[in-house]
Amino acid sequence: MFHRMARRSALFALLPAIVLAQGTAEHPFGTLREQARMQQAWLQKRLDTFLPALMRKHGVDFWVVPMREYNEDPVFSSITAPETMFARRRTIYAFFDRCATAGAPPAASCVERIALGGTSQGGVFTARRSMKAVSSGTVGGRQAELWGDEQWQALKQLIEEKNPKVIGIDRSRTFAFSDGLSSGELAGMSEALGEKWTARFKDAEALPLELIASRLPEEEAFFTKMTEFVWRMTAAMFSNEVIVPGKTRTSDVVWWWRQRVSDQGLGTWFQPSIEVQRKGVDGEKLGDDPIIQHGDVLHCDVGITVARLNTDTQHMAYVLLPGETDAPAGLKQALANSNAMQDFAMEEVRPGRTGNEALKSVLERMKAKGIDGTMYSHPIGVNGHGAGPLVGLWDYQDGVPGRGDAKVIPSMWFSVELQATTPVPEWGGQAVRMAQEEDMVIGTDGKARWALRRQDRLLLVK
């Protein structure tokens, strides 16, 4: 017993050193505290910059967003502080454009932001609390939080005070981002407000969609740094640092990515994937976890999450055969075909056009150039598959009803995702699929540019 206790004491004595050693993770984007300060500044500026114009654009002078803890509206992470992970009990966020009736131009000073429940989110909202005081000594006589039906009555009082013409609610049959109002919250709110005010409800479908999608120049600059990081990680992953042909399985590469991301204090919004194409071998015969061999074409789909922003990248690599110093010309041409599709997307995805219109134009240009492929691009930002128009789906190349009918707006980001299938002479005419994905920024000027650049050369593994 004595010896066991002694060993245990010795182990406890070592714990601080162990914890210290494990806690020395890299912080390529700063500490969480530094990121939070940055995100808070973004939040304030985004609501000041985008919200007034969007409310006016979509004809809503009062926007109400009620939600309960663990059943948050999709817009939640776009209107709350970085320290807020969930709604507090029930939180009702309300936005009132007091300048709308006067015909004044939209401005940050026009939109009042009120939180009925929860906090001010770092001063971004005016928080209204219960009128009931809690006398228990354990809480020091603090004011109670709004609770239950009292919150609906507080909302009714606020609406009567502001007398809005149009009350926007988050309800949509097309866009998940615009459908955050749960049936229970709608029923409770409608019962409390009565016919006079529910008659002024309007589905504010495009308002949350475009607010979530809109990004600041400061966020764009940070996004470029994230993309640079992904490129460096991908180059390391598709190298002999990670891959030993004849020994390394695709699952080894996948988990290298996951572990490396975690070790640097970052997150990811999806499980990465590695795919193999091999000369003379049907893809299905390779199995789910093949060993990477010389002569293979490799494809990755990877992403990271930092400061509530997400990347989505697909790059291609070639594992050199003994004696080779470069990829075969046919594989280079296959990549060039997918690069051409990227050029088409860069030119056709522009503000004012719907996703379906952009898709149609890209496919027409592909046909004219004799490129066999598919386009399936999506917005990105706070969500990996972000708010905004889809530009095709891999299995819907004739347009995406509803979700492809939304319009591209300035300050929106896209993941340009696509694939070109090309016969490769060096592989006996076997078709090789070059699937690429690069993040693209549409600036405030409406012009599209890569968040960093696009891959125009295959990564080479020896």
Image (cartoon, rainbow, N blue to C red):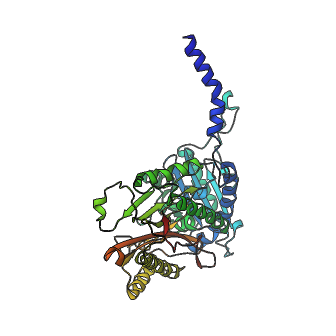
Corner quadrant of residue 213: bottom right
Number of numbered discs visible in the structure rendering: 0
Q: Answer yes or no: is residue 187 visible.
A: no
Q: Position of residue 158 (x, y in %)?
A: 62, 56
Compared with residue 127, is residue 418 higher up or lower down, i.e. above or below? below
Which of these two is toward me, 366 or 35? 366
Q: Relative to residue 335, is residue 220 drawn left or right? A: right
Which of these two is toward me, 90 or 71? 71
Q: Answer yes or no: is residue 389 visible.
A: yes
Corner quadrant of residue 212: bottom right
User: The N terminus appears in which quarter of the rendering?
Assistant: top right
Task: Name the outermost residue toward the top.
Answer: 2
Q: Position of residue 366 (x, y in %)?
A: 40, 83
Compared with residue 347, is residue 187 higher up or lower down, i.e. above or below? above
Q: Position of residue 181 (x, y in %)?
A: 47, 56
Which of these two is toward me, 99 or 198? 99
Q: Relative to residue 80, is residue 436 drawn left or right? A: left
Which of these two is toward me, 355 or 184? 355
Q: Position of residue 97 (x, y in %)?
A: 64, 66
Query: What residue is drawn where x is 36% and y is 54%?
Result: 289
Compared with residue 350, is residue 462 higher up or lower down, i.e. above or below? above
Task: Name the outermost residue toward the front.
Answer: 323
Task: Name the outermost residue toward the bottom.
Answer: 368
